[in-house]
């Protein structure tokens, strides 16, 4: 009996957490973005939900009037990055679905860096990398609402895709996406930045201590804002 009560209590706590998580994108219609609503997923590590992506969030808010941004509260501090990606991707899909329900006229941008890049690509395209825990793709009907999907240093990167945007042309990520065609419904919104010298998305090319994995923000944040602006106009 005690055992059952204990598990019952654990279950209620888990459920409460789930409900709270899923409701956090319930937005009052007066708060719906008239610019873009950007959900930004950071890399692995402790601390706040925007971390090195704060500058990009600020640029979006400054340069695209009527915008809102959210540092995506996935489990970025988890030791197990596979479950962090899996649960984060499912949660991101849920956030998109909830936000579109509450704000059907708003446009969205999904942005991710490093571990956040992996979960963002998983949420949009679904899983086709060995080792990653399977997630289904986002329903293609969201491709009129989600007008930008931008990632930096994605470990599921594969060469020769129309959305590849950095200077890495022939390397691949450490969990290469075996079937990138599942991303195609979102092709016009996708930009995947991967540079030579980033061991995580562009292995095995020049080893320079993964330096390029840390320079995307400075190098490309403004391009990302310009891309979102262009996508909002089209
Ligand atoms: C959305 O996806 C559908 C199905 O793949 C495709 O026909 C359509 O062109 C896409 N729309 C946009 C805006 O990319
Ligand atoms: C690619 O970008 C990285 C990071 O900015 C830079 O270090 C490298 O020199 C660039 N490589 C080429 C071939 O342009």
Image: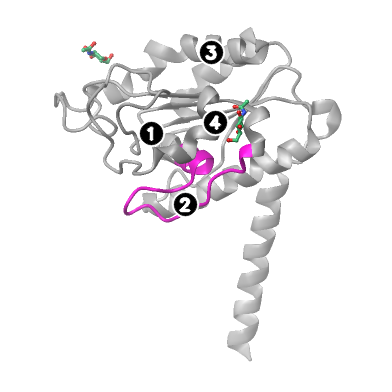
In the picture provided, is 64 more to the left or to the right than 59? right
Q: Secondary structure at mark 4?
A: helix
State whether label 4 is within 8 Å of ligand 1: yes
In space, the residues marked 2 and 1 are separated at their CA atoms by 14 Å
Q: Which residue is mark 2?
A: 86
Q: Taking the image as drawn, is residue 134 in sight?
A: yes
Quadrant of the image for the N terminus? bottom right
Q: Which mark is residue 189?
A: none
Which one is in front, 175 or 198?
175
Which one is in front, 187 or 201?
187
Q: Which residue is mark 4?
A: 186
Q: Secondary structure at mark 2?
A: helix
Place of residue 17 in the rendered image (x, y in percent of width and height, measured from the top left) = 65, 57
Q: Which residues are magenta?
A: 119-140
Q: Secondary structure at mark 1?
A: loop
Q: Which residue is mark 3?
A: 227
């Amino acid at each position: 009996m005690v055992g059952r009560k204990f598990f019952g209590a654990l279950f209620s706590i888990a459920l409460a957490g789930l409900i709270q998580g899923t409701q956090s994108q319930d937005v009052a219609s007066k708060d719906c973005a008239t610019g873009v609503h950007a959900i930004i997923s950071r890399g692995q590590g402790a601390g706040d939900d925007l971390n090195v992506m704060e500058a990009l969030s600020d640029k979006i808010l400054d340069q695209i009037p009527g915008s809102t941004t959210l540092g995506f509260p996935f489990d970025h501090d988890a030791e197990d990055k596979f479950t962090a990606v899996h649960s984060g991707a499912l949660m991101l899909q849920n956030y998109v679905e909830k936000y579109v329900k509450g704000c059907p006229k708003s446009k969205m941008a999904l942005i991710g860096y490093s571990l956040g890049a992996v979960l963002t690509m998983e949420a949009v395209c679904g899983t086709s990398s060995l080792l990653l825990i399977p997630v289904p793709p986002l329903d293609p009907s969201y491709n009129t609402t989600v007008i930008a999907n931008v990632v930096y240093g994605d470990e599921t990167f594969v060469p020769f895709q129309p959305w590849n945007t950095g200077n890495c042309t022939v390397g691949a990520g450490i969990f290469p996406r075996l079937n990138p065609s599942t991303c195609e419904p979102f092709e016009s919104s996708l930009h995947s930045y991967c540079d030579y010298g980033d061991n995580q998305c562009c292995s095995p090319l020049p080893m320079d201590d993964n330096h390029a994995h840390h320079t995307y923000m400075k190098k490309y944040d403004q391009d990302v804002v310009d891309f979102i602006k262009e996508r909002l106009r089209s």
